[in-house]
Image (spheres, rainbow, N blue to C red):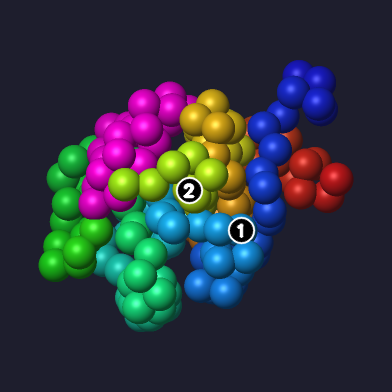
Amino acid sequence: MARKELPKATRVFRHFSEITPEILSEYGIKGIMTDLDDTLVEHNYPTPKEDVLLWLESIEKAGIPICIVSNNRRRRVLSFIKSLNLGIFHNSMKPSPRPIYKAMEVMGITPEESVFVGDQLFTDIKGANNAGIKSFLVDPIGNKATLFIRFKRRLEKRTRKG
Ligand SMILES: [Mg+2]
Protein backbone atom coordinates (compact mmCIF):
# COMPACT_ATOMS: atom_id res chain seq x y z
CA MET A 1 0.00 0.00 0.00
CA ALA A 2 1.44 3.35 -0.96
CA ARG A 3 2.09 5.71 1.88
CA LYS A 4 -0.05 8.46 0.41
CA GLU A 5 -3.07 6.15 0.54
CA LEU A 6 -2.97 5.83 4.33
CA PRO A 7 -5.79 7.62 6.11
CA LYS A 8 -4.57 10.81 7.70
CA ALA A 9 -5.65 12.10 11.10
CA THR A 10 -6.25 15.78 11.75
CA ARG A 11 -4.03 15.56 14.83
CA VAL A 12 -2.23 12.87 16.81
CA PHE A 13 -2.32 12.52 20.61
CA ARG A 14 -0.75 9.99 22.94
CA HIS A 15 -3.79 9.62 25.18
CA PHE A 16 -7.45 10.68 25.13
CA SER A 17 -6.94 12.78 28.28
CA GLU A 18 -4.78 15.18 26.26
CA ILE A 19 -7.91 16.14 24.31
CA THR A 20 -9.12 19.01 26.47
CA PRO A 21 -12.12 21.32 26.05
CA GLU A 22 -9.60 24.05 25.09
CA ILE A 23 -8.25 21.96 22.22
CA LEU A 24 -11.78 21.05 21.13
CA SER A 25 -12.76 24.70 21.03
CA GLU A 26 -9.60 25.48 19.04
CA TYR A 27 -10.96 23.16 16.34
CA GLY A 28 -14.56 24.39 16.66
CA ILE A 29 -15.73 20.99 17.93
CA LYS A 30 -19.30 20.81 19.30
CA GLY A 31 -19.58 17.04 19.62
CA ILE A 32 -17.28 14.01 19.90
CA MET A 33 -17.54 10.52 18.55
CA THR A 34 -15.12 8.14 20.17
CA ASP A 35 -14.01 4.58 19.69
CA LEU A 36 -14.06 2.41 22.82
CA ASP A 37 -11.60 -0.52 22.74
CA ASP A 38 -7.94 0.47 23.00
CA THR A 39 -8.98 4.12 22.82
CA LEU A 40 -10.61 4.62 26.24
CA VAL A 41 -9.64 1.31 27.89
CA GLU A 42 -7.87 -1.90 26.92
CA HIS A 43 -9.76 -4.13 24.51
CA ASN A 44 -12.82 -5.56 26.28
CA TYR A 45 -11.89 -4.07 29.67
CA PRO A 46 -15.34 -4.11 31.30
CA THR A 47 -15.74 -0.70 32.97
CA PRO A 48 -14.60 2.91 32.60
CA LYS A 49 -11.52 3.67 34.73
CA GLU A 50 -11.08 6.84 36.77
CA ASP A 51 -9.25 8.65 33.94
CA VAL A 52 -12.12 7.91 31.54
CA LEU A 53 -14.72 9.19 34.02
CA LEU A 54 -12.73 12.37 34.67
CA TRP A 55 -12.29 13.02 30.98
CA LEU A 56 -15.97 12.45 30.20
CA GLU A 57 -16.90 14.76 33.05
CA SER A 58 -14.63 17.56 31.83
CA ILE A 59 -16.03 17.30 28.30
CA GLU A 60 -19.59 17.19 29.57
CA LYS A 61 -18.97 20.27 31.72
CA ALA A 62 -17.86 22.10 28.58
CA GLY A 63 -21.28 21.29 27.08
CA ILE A 64 -19.90 18.93 24.46
CA PRO A 65 -21.88 15.71 23.90
CA ILE A 66 -20.08 12.40 23.35
CA CYS A 67 -21.16 9.31 21.46
CA ILE A 68 -19.36 5.99 21.57
CA VAL A 69 -19.06 4.48 18.11
CA SER A 70 -17.73 0.94 18.39
CA ASN A 71 -17.45 -2.03 16.10
CA ASN A 72 -17.79 -4.25 19.15
CA ARG A 73 -21.04 -5.97 20.15
CA ARG A 74 -24.05 -4.40 21.77
CA ARG A 75 -23.60 -6.27 25.05
CA ARG A 76 -20.01 -5.14 25.44
CA VAL A 77 -20.72 -1.48 24.74
CA LEU A 78 -23.87 -1.39 26.88
CA SER A 79 -22.20 -2.96 29.89
CA PHE A 80 -19.28 -0.53 29.60
CA ILE A 81 -21.35 2.65 29.63
CA LYS A 82 -23.91 1.43 32.20
CA SER A 83 -25.08 4.59 33.98
CA LEU A 84 -23.12 7.03 31.85
CA ASN A 85 -25.09 9.50 29.82
CA LEU A 86 -23.62 8.67 26.44
CA GLY A 87 -25.04 7.90 23.05
CA ILE A 88 -23.85 4.57 21.73
CA PHE A 89 -23.48 2.94 18.36
CA HIS A 90 -22.40 -0.71 18.43
CA ASN A 91 -21.58 -3.06 15.53
CA SER A 92 -20.79 0.12 13.65
CA MET A 93 -18.92 -1.40 10.73
CA LYS A 94 -16.35 1.39 10.69
CA PRO A 95 -14.88 2.64 8.36
CA SER A 96 -18.45 2.98 7.15
CA PRO A 97 -19.41 6.65 7.57
CA ARG A 98 -23.00 5.68 8.36
CA PRO A 99 -22.75 5.52 12.19
CA ILE A 100 -20.96 8.88 12.09
CA TYR A 101 -23.80 10.45 10.09
CA LYS A 102 -26.25 9.05 12.64
CA ALA A 103 -24.23 10.28 15.60
CA MET A 104 -24.05 13.78 14.11
CA GLU A 105 -27.80 13.72 13.69
CA VAL A 106 -28.33 12.62 17.30
CA MET A 107 -26.00 15.35 18.60
CA GLY A 108 -27.37 17.95 16.21
CA ILE A 109 -23.97 18.96 14.86
CA THR A 110 -22.45 19.52 11.44
CA PRO A 111 -19.40 17.73 9.97
CA GLU A 112 -17.31 20.87 10.61
CA GLU A 113 -18.22 20.67 14.31
CA SER A 114 -17.45 16.96 14.65
CA VAL A 115 -14.38 14.96 15.54
CA PHE A 116 -13.73 11.24 15.76
CA VAL A 117 -11.32 10.00 18.43
CA GLY A 118 -9.80 6.56 17.87
CA ASP A 119 -6.73 4.34 17.88
CA GLN A 120 -7.02 2.70 14.48
CA LEU A 121 -6.21 4.29 11.15
CA PHE A 122 -8.17 1.82 9.07
CA THR A 123 -11.43 1.93 10.98
CA ASP A 124 -11.61 5.10 13.08
CA ILE A 125 -9.61 7.59 11.04
CA LYS A 126 -10.71 6.20 7.69
CA GLY A 127 -14.32 6.31 8.86
CA ALA A 128 -13.89 9.96 9.85
CA ASN A 129 -12.30 10.71 6.49
CA ASN A 130 -15.14 8.92 4.73
CA ALA A 131 -17.68 11.04 6.62
CA GLY A 132 -15.74 14.25 5.98
CA ILE A 133 -15.11 15.08 9.64
CA LYS A 134 -12.00 15.78 11.70
CA SER A 135 -10.15 12.99 13.46
CA PHE A 136 -7.85 12.66 16.46
CA LEU A 137 -5.64 9.57 16.49
CA VAL A 138 -4.56 8.29 19.91
CA ASP A 139 -2.02 5.62 20.81
CA PRO A 140 -3.68 2.26 21.52
CA ILE A 141 -4.03 1.66 25.26
CA GLY A 142 -3.71 -2.12 25.32
CA ASN A 143 -1.10 -4.39 23.86
CA LYS A 144 -3.13 -7.57 23.50
CA ALA A 145 -3.50 -6.92 19.81
CA THR A 146 -4.28 -9.66 17.33
CA LEU A 147 -1.86 -10.40 14.50
CA PHE A 148 -3.98 -8.44 12.07
CA ILE A 149 -4.12 -5.43 14.34
CA ARG A 150 -0.36 -5.69 14.86
CA PHE A 151 0.14 -5.63 11.10
CA LYS A 152 -1.97 -2.51 10.85
CA ARG A 153 -0.10 -0.92 13.78
CA ARG A 154 3.17 -1.25 11.84
CA LEU A 155 1.69 0.75 8.99
CA GLU A 156 0.23 3.23 11.44
CA LYS A 157 3.61 3.78 13.08
CA ARG A 158 4.98 5.00 9.77
CA THR A 159 2.37 7.71 9.52
CA ARG A 160 2.81 8.73 13.15
CA LYS A 161 6.45 9.42 12.36
CA GLY A 162 5.67 11.30 9.18
MG1 LIG B 1 -10.09 0.69 18.95
- In the picture as drawn, the residue positioned furthest to the top comes out as 1
In terms of image quadrants, where is residue 154? Answer: top right
Q: Count the marks: how many? A: 2
In terms of image quadrants, where is residue 148? Answer: top right
Looking at numbered disc 2 in the image, what kind of residue is underneath it?
Answer: Ser
Secondary structure under tag 1 reads: loop
Where are the magenta residues, as a range? Answer: 87-107
For residue 107, say whether it is visible.
yes
Quarter of the picture holding the C terminus = top right
**Residue at 38% from the left image edge and 64% from the top image edge:** 64
- Say which residue label 1 marks: 27
For residue 93, say whether it is visible.
no
Marks 2 and 1, the one that precedes in the sequence: 1
Comparing 120 with 28, the one in front is 28
Looking at numbered disc 1 in the image, what kind of residue is underneath it?
Answer: Tyr
- Say which residue label 2 marks: 114
